[in-house]
């Protein structure tokens, strides 16, 4: 059993906690609430020959600029930051506006192009390079806005149903959670810490410095979609780490990564998520806190059940298969078409919504009481918002080519593109990806070969930059990474030597890994330490003995106060 909540390791832990506490997006996610008042439905196609690209000489010093350029005030601030950066000796700007991912979609009006052109003109005025941030394969909202079905879904296998009297398929499962209403105190629960007690039909978590958790172990079937639900009340409550998770006791890993939004004092509030059991046959439901906590929290009406499809996706690489008594059922004949009408159209996914209602049409071969097994694919967001796109679906490859072509048109002088393959927590689970028979690392390596070819087609001679973590065995390129199926080791074998790694772990081991492979590296530094000079000095010390291609001032909280101090130390 886990004595501490499974969390990201190393620098990933620091950043994940920061995102959860400050609601700061990670590198390739939406930088700020987007003002979509100027979004339009159509745009004219862009036609021109892709320009050649030249890589700048010398040590590079960049800023990572995440401003939403559709907003007038943001453009003004971005121009001011560029002016300051140029005066301080910076040589380039990574333009990481989320809307760069929408350039080819027709979703932006001419105002955005005007603002982007103004920013690029100012960058060029100062003799700096502009590098667009593209291809959001970790935080894939930009891709999934075009079609939510391009998300990487997890397989649900033989989910059991029975035909009800109303001609609707009802979930037919024995999975349940005894004692979830606490009407008999804590009876039915497997174990609990000393800080948990029964309190008038609820479970109470008292103030303390030790873990205070309530646990029940359940038998489940592999690859089933579960609905986890509970109610929570708090009074002056805070905790080092609050969590509700399903834990695969055999694999030793959590099956969900969820950010639980709550107030220090709130009345009874219901929470719902879906969780895929993956390979698990035994899971433990953990509720409570790890470490120090103050105030009081109460749990009630806790349940774990199998569910009809939630966040159901439909594409060639995510098919549906239905059976009854060993015979295949035909969609549109034996079952009405299965469509999740509650899928969002903004590239994000709910943690829970009402499941798909599966109905039996007139003339179906099914009768009341018949049992049905359903295979399908469904999406479970990580930390409430993050979903990755499929790496193999042809429509995703089309999206990549179209976006890169539009980016090349808007960034004619860019010497490189910066690919947002970062914290890819969904991978190798849909039918298309799993069907390759590759490990996650092999799959990602092959995908990167195709990405490099797409970049060369869109902009010949352009260099590819990519975040380091998914290609670093010291960071995220390993086994048991979130919802990824299989080991990500070896992913780096898909990178040509000319690919530059933007290293955001920048430990000596990480830097040595890529240096040994012959890759140039830029350190993604600062990270809101409050002391730009000290951060730059520390980062240079970590890279001792390694010739860096450059460094980058990276802020997730919009702290530009250390811009000059960071540059002064970095350029020494």
Image (cartoon, rainbow, N blue to C red):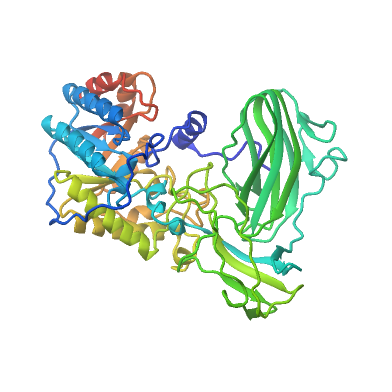
44 horizontally vs 298: left or right:
left
Rendered position, 438 above or below 254: below
Rendered position, 145 above or below 157: above
Q: Nearer the viewer, residue 340 or 527?
A: 340
Q: Nearer the viewer, residue 193 or 323?
A: 323
Q: Is residue 548 visible?
A: no
Q: Nearer the viewer, residue 544 or 294?
A: 294
- Residue 473: x percent and y percent? 42, 47
Q: Nearer the viewer, residue 17 or 367?
A: 367
Q: Is residue 52 visible?
A: yes
Rendered position, 189 above or below 484: above
Residue appearing at x 20%, y 56% in the figure: 458
- Residue 211: x percent and y percent? 69, 30
440 horizontally vs 193: left or right:
left
Split into 4 quadrants, where in the image is the N terminus? top right
- Residue 221: x percent and y percent? 68, 61
Q: Say how many tags the image has.
A: 0
57 horizontally vs 281: left or right:
left
Residue most extreme to the right:
184
- Residue 481: x percent and y percent? 50, 49
Split into 4 quadrants, where in the image is the C terminus? top left
Q: Quadrant of residue 38?
A: top left
Rendered position, 504 above or below 465: above
């Amino acid at each position: 059993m886990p004595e501490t909540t499974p969390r990201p390791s190393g620098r990933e832990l620091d950043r994940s906690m920061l995102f959860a506490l400050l609601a700061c997006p990670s590198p390739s996610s939406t930088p700020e609430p987007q003002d979509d008042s100027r979004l339009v439905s159509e745009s004219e196609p862009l036609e021109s020959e892709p320009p050649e690209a030249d890589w700048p000489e010398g040590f590079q010093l960049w800023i990572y600029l995440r401003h939403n350029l559709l907003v007038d005030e943001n453009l003004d601030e971005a121009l001011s930051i560029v002016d300051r950066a140029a005066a301080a000796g910076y040589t380039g700007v990574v333009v990481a506006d989320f809307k760069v991912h929408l350039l080819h979609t027709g979703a932006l009006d001419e105002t955005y192009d005007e603002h982007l052109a103004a920013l690029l003109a100012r960058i060029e005025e100062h003799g700096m390079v502009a590098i667009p941030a593209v291809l959001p394969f970790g935080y894939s909202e930009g891709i999934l806005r075009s079609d939510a079905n391009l998300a990487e879904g997890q397989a649900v296998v033989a989910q059991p149903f029975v035909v009800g009297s109303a001609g609707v398929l009802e979930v037919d499962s024995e999975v349940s959670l005894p004692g979830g209403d606490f009407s008999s105190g804590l009876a039915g629960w497997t174990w609990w810490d000393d800080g948990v007690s029964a309190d008038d039909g609820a479970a109470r978590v008292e103030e303390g410095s030790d873990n205070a958790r309530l646990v029940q172990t359940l038998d489940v079937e592999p690859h089933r979609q579960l609905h986890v639900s509970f109610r929570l009340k708090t009074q002056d409550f805070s905790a080092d780490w609050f969590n509700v998770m399903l834990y695969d006791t055999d694999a030793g890993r959590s099956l969900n990564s969820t950010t639980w939004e709550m107030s220090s004092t709130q009345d009874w509030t219901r929470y719902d998520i879906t969780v895929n059991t993956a390979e698990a046959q035994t899971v433990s439901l953990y509720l409570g806190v790890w470490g120090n906590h103050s105030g009081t929290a109460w749990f009630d009406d806790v349940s774990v059940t199998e569910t009809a499809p939630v966040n159901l996706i439909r594409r060639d690489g995510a098919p549906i298969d239905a059976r009854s008594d060993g015979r295949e059922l035909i969609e549109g004949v034996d079952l009405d078409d299965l469509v999740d009408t509650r899928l969002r159209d903004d590239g994000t996914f709910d943690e829970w919504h009402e499941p798909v209602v599966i109905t039996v049409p007139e003339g179906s071969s099914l009768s009341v009481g018949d049992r049905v097994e359903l295979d399908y694919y469904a999406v479970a967001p990580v930390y409430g918002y993050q979903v990755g796109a499929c790496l193999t679906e042809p429509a995703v490859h089309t999206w990549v080519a179209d976006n890169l072509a539009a980016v090349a048109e808007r960034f004619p002088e860019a010497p490189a593109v910066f690919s947002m393959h970062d914290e890819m927590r969904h991978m190798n689970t849909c039918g298309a990806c799993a069907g390759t028979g590759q490990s996650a690392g092999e799959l990602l390596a092959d995908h990167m070969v195709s990405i490099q070819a797409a970049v060369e087609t869109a902009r010949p001679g352009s260099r590819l930059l990519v975040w380091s973590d998914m290609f670093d065995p010291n960071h995220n390129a390993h086994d048991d990474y979130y919802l990824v199926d299989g080991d990500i080791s070896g992913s780096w074998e898909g990178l040509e030597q000319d690919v530059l790694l933007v290293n955001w772990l920048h430990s000596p081991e990480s830097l040595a890994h890529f240096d040994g492979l012959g890759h140039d590296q830029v350190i993604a530094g600062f990270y809101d330490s409050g002391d730009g000079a000290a951060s730059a000095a520390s980062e240079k010390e970590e890279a001792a003995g390694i010739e860096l291609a450059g460094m980058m001032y990276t802020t997730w909280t919009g702290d530009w106060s250390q811009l000059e101090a960071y540059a002064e130390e970095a350029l020494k």
